[in-house]
Each structure stands twice: as C-alpha cells, then as structure tokens.
C-alpha cells in the first residue's frame, strides 16, 4: 500500500521537474554570483577555454589557468588582467568614507599536460597550497587526431582518449575531495554533440567524448546518492564551433546554412548561463536534442538514411582531407 502512495508522489515530482525545466525556458532564472570564487579552467590557452576565462573574469572570479602551451596560456592571463584592471574600483576619488578592503580577483597560470596524471596531481597540489579552495572546475581541454582510424598513429588515438576523457578523472580526483568537505563547488564538463551521437571518421573523438559524458553522468548520480546537493554539475554539448578545430567539416550544401558553425562567443555565453543557473545540461543548437532523441529511438538503418540525406554521413571527410593537407605541408616545410 505504501508503495502506491510513493508512486503517486514520484509521478507528481517527475511532473514538477519537467514543468520546472520548461519554466526555465520562459522565465530567466537568477544567475548565481562567482565573485571572489576560484575557478580552474583546463585548456585555457585558446578556443572555448580562453573565452570561459574571460567570462569568469568579467564576473569577478579569480582564475587558475591550465594549458600545455605556456605562451598561449600567458596571453589569456594578460587578457584577464586587462579585464580586472578595468574593473578595479577607482582609488583616490577624494571620498572620505572609511576605506573598506575590496576583494581583488587574481589570475594564476600553470603549465600542465592534463593527459599525464602525475602532472595533474602535482599541479593541483600547487594550486591548493599557493592559491586556495577551488569552487569551479571547468574540464575544457580537448584535442582531435583528425585522421582516419587506420591511418592514425596509435599514440594520437591514446592522446585523444587521455586529454578528452581520462583527464576528467584526474582533475576531479584532485579537486572533488575539498568540494565534498565544504559541500560546495561546481564541475563543468565541456563535451560535444559528438559525445551524444556520432559520424564517420572521428572514432577517437567520439569515443573520448562519449566517455567524458558517461563519467559526468555517473558522477552526477554519485553526488545525488551522497546527497551532496551543494556541488553542481553542468554538461556542455556544443555542435560544431568556429574555433577551427574541425576546419573543413561540411554537411549538405542546401542544409548547411541552417546549421552554421556556432560562434565561440555565443557558445560560451550560453554555457555560462547554464552554469550560473545550475542547469545540468546544455546542448547547442537546440536541434541537437532532437538528433539525440531520434538516434535513441530509431533503428540504425533509419539513422543512416537520415544522415545520408543530410550529408552528415561523410561530413568529416573534408575536414580529414584538410588536416592531411596541412600536415603534409608542415612536414614539407620542416624538411626545407
Ligand atoms: C603556443 O601558443 C602560441 C601563441 O598562441 C602559438 O603561436 C604556438 O603555435 C603554440 N604552440 C604550439 C606548440 O601549439
């Protein structure tokens, strides 16, 4: 008898969650403050990572930037400092009001190869010791081999798996314990729509992003099971972004204008909104929710037909060709 009551209650709660999620579409949820919080971003030297850094900086968060490329990471740090400088309250305005100590956000840079767990643990230890408690962890670093499976050196495949997937384990193991102690924090997984459905020629990338999403979902459930409601998680799944990572990728010409590559700035703004309103997941553009749903319910052959119609079956081939060409050119240049 008891279970029937419970079932009614669950139905009510499920309905309530759905309505609440729908409501977020219509009513803008309040954004939480990140002012004075510490935010770690991996792959901060370029692309989305850099833009995430600038967004957090504009909102007054302190930043810990990780990248394997020192000079690229420093460039981002300079941009962040510029933002802080413009933000800093004017001094010497002649006000006689007693001076209140104002929090001044800071930026720290670390060279870290996230595919190397020793490197991650050592760098995280430095951050804990020298900077403090991390509130936001943005697992953003990502790579793609850009070769056909049978032409791809094993090392490149391993690298994609380590950077895009394994690294999430190491960074989370490094920073989650303190978040659990405080029951406070936010872990962001920057995945891809290629972590929800796939296409030909990007086996390494899809495997790693599916892996990252599996990791993210399981960890989300684990935090719920442990009733650590103070730690939030957000999964970000953008479709093609104009950062040049998949340069050359092309769907059917007549349809391509409907799905232009996302502007990286737009992508990060949407993701920030999701993060700051504790939204568990965001897909961009929204049509990608439909693709994910179709892929789940339709038979494989039906999906193949649709892919062929959309030109999504071989959309990565021009990208692979483009990569091959530029690699050859580089090799040619380095032999000169
Ligand atoms: C590192 O970043 C700099 C500045 O963005 C760039 O010019 C350089 O090519 C990068 N190095 C590597 C190895 O990617």
Image (spheres, rainbow, N blue to C red):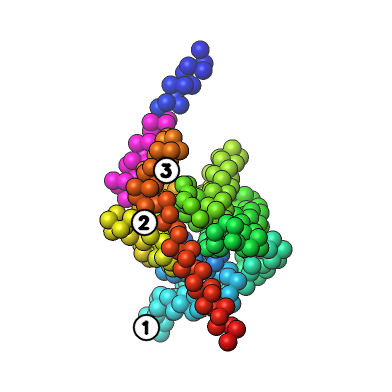
Q: Nearer the viewer, residue 74 or 82?
A: 74
Would you say residue 51 is visible in this rendering?
no
The first of marks 3 and 2 along the sequence is 2
Does the magenta stretch mainly form a helix, a strand or a loop? helix
On residue 304, the disc is 3
Q: Is residue 10 left or right of residue 207?
A: left
On residue 93, the disc is 1
On residue 251, the disc is 2
What residue sits 37% from the left and 83% below the top?
93
Few, some or many C-alpha atoms within 10 Å of disc 1 (few <14, some 14-19, many ≥20)?
few
Location of residue 6 with respect to 46 vertically, above or below: above
Q: Looking at mark 1, is its residue's CB closer than 8 Å to ligand 1?
A: no
In the rendered image, the quadrant that contains the C terminus is bottom right
Camera-near label (3 vs 1) is 3
The first of marks 2 and 1 along the sequence is 1
Camera-near label (2 vs 1) is 2
Residue 212: x percent and y percent?
56, 51
Which region of the structure is painted magenta? 13-31
Residue 102: x percent and y percent?
47, 72
Q: Nearer the viewer, residue 233 or 242?
A: 242
Q: Rounded to the nearest whole Å, what is the CA distance between mark 3 and mark 2?
A: 14 Å
Specify the quadrant of the image occupied by residue 113.
Answer: bottom right
What residue sits 59% from the left and 57% below the top?
150
């Amino acid at each position: 008898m008891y279970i029937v009551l419970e079932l009614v209650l669950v139905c009510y709660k499920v309905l309530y969650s759905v309505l609440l999620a729908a409501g977020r579409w219509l009513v803008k949820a309040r954004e939480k403050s990140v002012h004075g919080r510490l935010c770690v971003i991996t792959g901060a030297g370029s692309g989305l990572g850099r833009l995430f850094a600038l967004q957090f900086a504009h909102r007054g968060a302190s930043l810990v930037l990780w990248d394997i490329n020192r000079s690229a990471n420093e460039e981002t740090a300079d941009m962040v400092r510029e933002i802080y400088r413009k933000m800093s309250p004017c001094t010497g305005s002649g006000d006689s009001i007693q001076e209140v100590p104002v929090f001044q956000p800071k930026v720290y840079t670390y060279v870290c190869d996230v595919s190397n767990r020793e490197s991650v643990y050592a760098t995280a230890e430095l951050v804990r010791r020298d900077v403090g408690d991390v509130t936001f962890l943005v697992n953003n670093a990502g790579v793609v081999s850009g070769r056909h499976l049978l032409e791809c050196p094993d090392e490149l495949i391993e690298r994609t798996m380590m950077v895009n997937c394994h690294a999430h384990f190491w960074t989370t193991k490094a920073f989650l314990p303190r978040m659990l102690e405080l029951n406070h924090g936010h872990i962001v997984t920057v995945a891809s729509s290629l972590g929800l459905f796939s296409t030909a020629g990007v086996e390494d990338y899809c495997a790693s992003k599916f892996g990252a999403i599996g990791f993210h979902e399981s960890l989300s459930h684990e935090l719920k099971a442990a009733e650590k409601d103070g730690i939030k998680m957000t999964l970000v799944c953008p479709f093609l972004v104009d950062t040049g990572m998949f340069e050359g990728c092309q769907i059917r010409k007549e349809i391509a204008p409907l799905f232009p590559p996302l502007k990286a700035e737009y992508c990060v703004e949407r993701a920030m909104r999701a993060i700051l309103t504790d939204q568990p997941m965001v897909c961009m553009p929204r049509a990608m929710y439909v693709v994910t749903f179709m892929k789940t319910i339709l038979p494989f052959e039906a999906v193949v037909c649709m892919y062929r119609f959309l030109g999504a079956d071989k959309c990565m081939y021009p990208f692979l060709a483009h990569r091959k060409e530029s690699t050859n050119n580089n090799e040619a240049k380095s032999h000169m």
